[in-house]
Image (cartoon, rainbow, N blue to C red):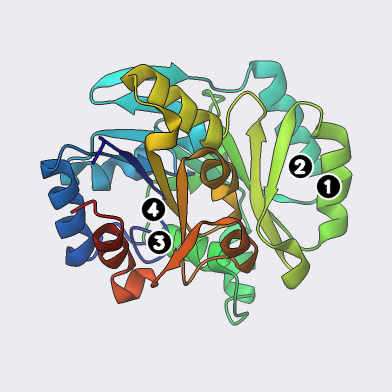
């Protein structure tokens, strides 16, 4: 079998949403694949700071901030924060439209005051994995601090949570020329959540950048994901696998569906694909 580059989303794919501990079965599959000569990369919307707890598991590289920051081994091969103008434009526009913002930098994340209270108020609403993920991350204090502590350091991505789609659409009209809005199945939930990304990168472009750096054809890449922020990665990779616990929309785009993260999905998929 040719050497493959395997790209793994984290929340809902490698781990249960909001967790930093992969199931033992997933770690066994990853180690076995690496022993066969395959390369395994984290490919996450998380910023680099949020990825740190997982680096102990010895991945071959990381794609952080949905493609805005990429490391192959110890080498940084791509680093693209927003410009100061872009940063101010995004933050001001979202605030003016009453949308909760969490800005992600290399050193940590900063969220609007009142955001945690908003999440707690809607904690009983089912089906929104991003709502659950952010609630867990804030409660577990994964270096998500108050916006009052934000000192203007470079921003790679802004996670948004809007009480309704109308507010987000207004912001999108002002920003979509330079920024991509990745919305999580917005038609299914009154609360709308997603990410605002610089159009210069996304997870799909990151797959291409890594493959080019490694001199491995993109068709020899395999992507595993579960939510709509994995869409470009799944469409770009040579083969794509969606978790059973994933977005219904994403399942339709994937080449196959594997069991959920809680049912050892990666392990079973690695076996079926001959990666271990």
Q: Mark 2 against mark 3, which lies toward the viewer?
A: 3
Q: In the rendered view, tell whether residue 14 sits above or below residue 102.
A: below
Q: In the image shown, does 11 or 232 lie closer to the viewer?
A: 232
Q: CA distance from mark 4 to mark 2?
A: 26 Å
Query: Do the CB atoms of the residues marked 1 and 4 lie less than 8 Å apart?
Result: no
Q: Is residue 165 visible?
A: yes
Q: Residue at x 45, y 58 (%)?
A: 138
Residue topped by disc 1:
97
* Disc 3, SS: loop
**Spot occupied by residue 258 in the image (x, y as percentages of width and height):** 40, 67
Q: Mark 4 against mark 3, which lies toward the viewer?
A: 4
Residue topped by disc 2:
94
Residue topped by disc 3:
18
Image quadrant where one finds the N terminus: top left
Q: Mark 3 against mark 1, which lies toward the viewer?
A: 3
Q: In the rendered image, which quarter is residue 274 located in? A: bottom left
- Dot 3 alpha-carbon crowd within 10 angstroms: few under 14, some 14 to 19, many 20 or more: many
Dot placed on the residue nearer the N-terminal end, 2 or 3: 3
């Amino acid at each position: 079998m040719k050497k493959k580059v395997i790209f793994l989303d984290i929340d809902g794919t490698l781990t249960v949403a909001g967790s930093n501990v992969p199931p033992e079965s997933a770690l066994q599959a990853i180690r076995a694949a690496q022993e066969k000569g395959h390369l395994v990369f984290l490919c996450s919307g998380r910023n680099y700071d949020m990825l740190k707890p997982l680096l102990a598991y010895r991945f071959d590289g990381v794609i952080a901030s949905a493609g805005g920051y990429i490391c192959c081994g110890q080498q940084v091969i791509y680093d693209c924060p927003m410009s100061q103008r872009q940063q101010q434009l995004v933050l001001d526009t979202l605030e003016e439209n009453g949308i909760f913002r969490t800005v992600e930098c290399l050193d940590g994340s900063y969220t609007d005051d009142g955001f945690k209270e908003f999440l707690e108020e809607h904690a009983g609403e089912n089906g929104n994995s991003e709502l659950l993920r952010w609630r867990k991350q804030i409660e577990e204090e994964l270096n998500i601090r108050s916006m009052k502590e934000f000192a203007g350091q470079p921003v790679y991505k802004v996670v948004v949570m809007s009480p309704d789609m109308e507010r987000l659409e207004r912001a999108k009209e002002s920003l979509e020329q330079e920024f991509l809005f990745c919305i999580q199945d917005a038609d299914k939930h009154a609360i709308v959540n997603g990410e605002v990304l610089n159009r210069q990168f996304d997870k799909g472009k990151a797959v291409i950048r890594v493959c080019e750096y490694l001199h491995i054809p993109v068709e020899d890449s395999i992507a595993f994901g579960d939510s709509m922020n994995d869409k470009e990665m799944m469409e770009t990779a040579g083969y794509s696998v969606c978790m059973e616990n994933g977005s219904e929309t994403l399942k339709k785009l994937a080449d196959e569906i594997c069991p959920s993260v809680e049912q050892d999905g990666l392990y079973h998929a690695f076996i079926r694909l001959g990666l271990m």
